[in-house]
Image (tube, coloured by chain):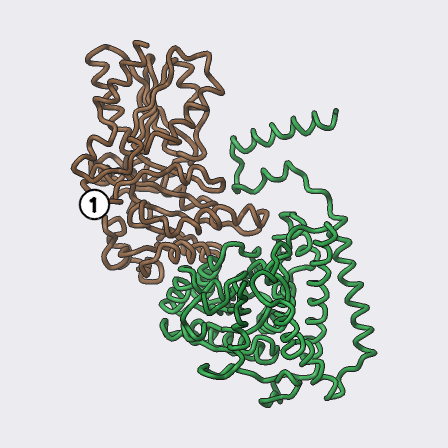
Chain colours: A brown, B green
Amino acid sequence: MSQHLTMIQAITEAMDQKLGQDDRVMILGQDIGVNGGVFRSTEGLFEKYGKDRVVDTPLAEAGIIGSAIGLALNGMVPVVEIQFLAFIYPGFEQIVSHAARMRYRTRGQFGVPLVIRTPYGAGIRGPELHSESVETFFAHTPGLKVVAPSNPYDAKGLLISAIEDPDPVIFLEPTKLYRAFKEEVPKEMYRIPIGQAKVVQEGSDLTIFAWGAMLREALNAAKKIENEKGWKCEVVDLRTLYPLDRDTIVKSIKKTGRGLVVHEAHKSSGLGAEIISIINDEALIYLKAPIKRVTGFDVPVPQFSVEDHYLPTVERIKQGIMETISF
Amino acid sequence: MEKTENPILKAYSKENLPEMYQVLAPNGEIIESIDGKIDKSLMLKMYESMLLLRMFDRKSVNLQRQGRMGTYAPFEGQEASQIGSAFALSAGDWMFPTYRDHAAAIIHGQEMYRVFLYWMGHVEGSICPEGKRTMPPCVPIATQMVHAVGTAWASKLKGEENVSIAYFGDGATSEGDFHEALNFAGVYKTPTIFFCQNNGYAISVPFEKQSASKTISQRADAYDIHGVRVDGNDIFAVWLTVKEAVERALKGEGPTLIEAITFRYGAHTTADNPNIYRNQEDISTFWRENRDPITRLKKLLINKGFWNEEQEEMVLKQISEQIDTHLQKAEEYPKADPLDMFNHVYAEESWHINEQQQELKQILKKDVKK
């Protein structure tokens, strides 16, 4: 059975179904109970599952993530919501020094099956520090998995996989896409494996790698380029940012011979650099041109009056494609 | 250079300070009746455990000096706090020790050879016996306190009769995680015991520079949880306090913050030189001579006719053999396999880690050929 859902509805449905199916699953966060979450991603869950399973917590990220680690050690499956990605920093130590290392330190004796969901990214006219895209911090931490869906269907399937994963998963939800569009989402539970990218559009001239909110910009740019120049771009949605799906990246580059990475995170030490390194290691001789990066700039994410200029635009992506193809 | 006055001496002086719960006075006299609470057999178990772990600690420091072990964090002087608290727990209780709480961990079932292994740089030193819930020593400060809230919360949700205990020092009480843990535990009334060993110094910083609070236990009031200040060198007082905290937790009455006043005789770690920041000789001599946890129990045991020097000699010999057996096991432990560092990062294998493991494997093969 199918239905048309926004990304936020798909995320709510994933949590609802896991709460219904598995008694160990708990949702924790600020304003996620009675209020249903600041983006309403937990709407209705408090009424349905009660205060012990959909928990309004004190306002303390280290406390939320740290106590969730304890809950996970002792058999629960906590799903934490951090209100915005830039608010996660007080809990950063808990994530990198404990959640990510517990299995390793105890040689598999104790694991931390924890999901941390958090909205990320710019483009919604948010206040300061509501628009960050710092996936690299987490993608640099062995022991974590980092996921960023770009559409409702993937969001539901990936979140169910994340909740079922025995290890901690940072689940980045592109704020801009929460209600941007609806698409067909199966009613029943399904899983999208963590660690698998997806070729969302086949092409032969160049591969664009993107994720989260940038995926749509990439698709728009690809469409325009095709109309204007007749060039066919392949578009790869990475979906999982750590560990990366090397096979899909390399296979696509071997086919097109040209690549472009689009991310809204800052350029320096961003994931684009890692993707280019993978291609360098595995497919250098297939390249017809250097791989470009179209990214957020190396400045703090600015306030919203200029955020559209900070973010990669369709125009900048098009420019990058043209420069690469006519190299 | 001006050396700071010993804040612990001040803590022991009663001016301006609330009472510290004490049962066994430093001179070996019983202040409060323990009839029906602590029998001869428990006393002897406590005493022999303190002897064992003091010897273990000294052995560890020596091993480091001899280059047979890495940097080590000694606990000598804090035996009553660690052993008394751990004796009050049940086998299935969750324990979150720091890097100085080996005595507590060993009493709760951790094996001595694993503690040696940990300080010899083996990851296997973090593993606790099957079925036990002793976490690896927490290296960052105060971060484990929130874990002990989470495990206790889960016990409560599942209806399991277990408490979680977090060990930490006076320095930890300045951390945000200390506050967050006490606050969360108060809100969710978790069966958590926050056991602070206030040994007066966070490495070099005395408590008076750590906080303007007169005591640590008074912080409990802010969270409306139970707070107790206890003589941490009085094993009876510690045991009774923690036992009561366990009972309160299991009755659903929530967490307890315990401040145990104690002192580390030695350095922060074997890499630290306490002479730089305190009058090490004077202070440790004062504590050894006047406040030692083992001496006071020995006085009581001898007065009661439960103990004599012959027994002590015999027990010390057994202890020494026991420690040597564990040391031998640790030193004969298979050499660490470098390739094992790639295991257990995730429950499932991941391509990039597997490849890096293969890469190192090839390098190791070449090394062997050379």
- Looking at the rendered image, the quarter that the N terminus of chain A falls into is top left
- Label 1 residue SS: loop
Residue B5 in the image: x percent, y percent? Answer: 53, 71
| In-front residue for pair B234/B37 | B234
User: In the image, B131: left or right of B62?
Assistant: left
| Residue at 49% in and 69% down | B193
User: In the image, B110: left or right of A264?
Assistant: right
| Residue at 27% in and 33% down | A213
User: In the image, A4: left or right of A96?
Assistant: left
| In-front residue for pair B195/B264 | B264
Residue that extends furthest to the left in the rendered view of this protein: A305
Query: What is the number of callouts on the image?
Result: 1
| Residue at 63% in and 75% down | B287
Q: Is residue A279 above or below residue A61?
A: above
Q: Quadrant of residue A270?
A: top left
User: In the image, A50: left or right of B361?
Assistant: left
Q: Disc 1 designates what residue?
A: A127
Residue B334 in the image: x percent, y percent? Answer: 73, 44
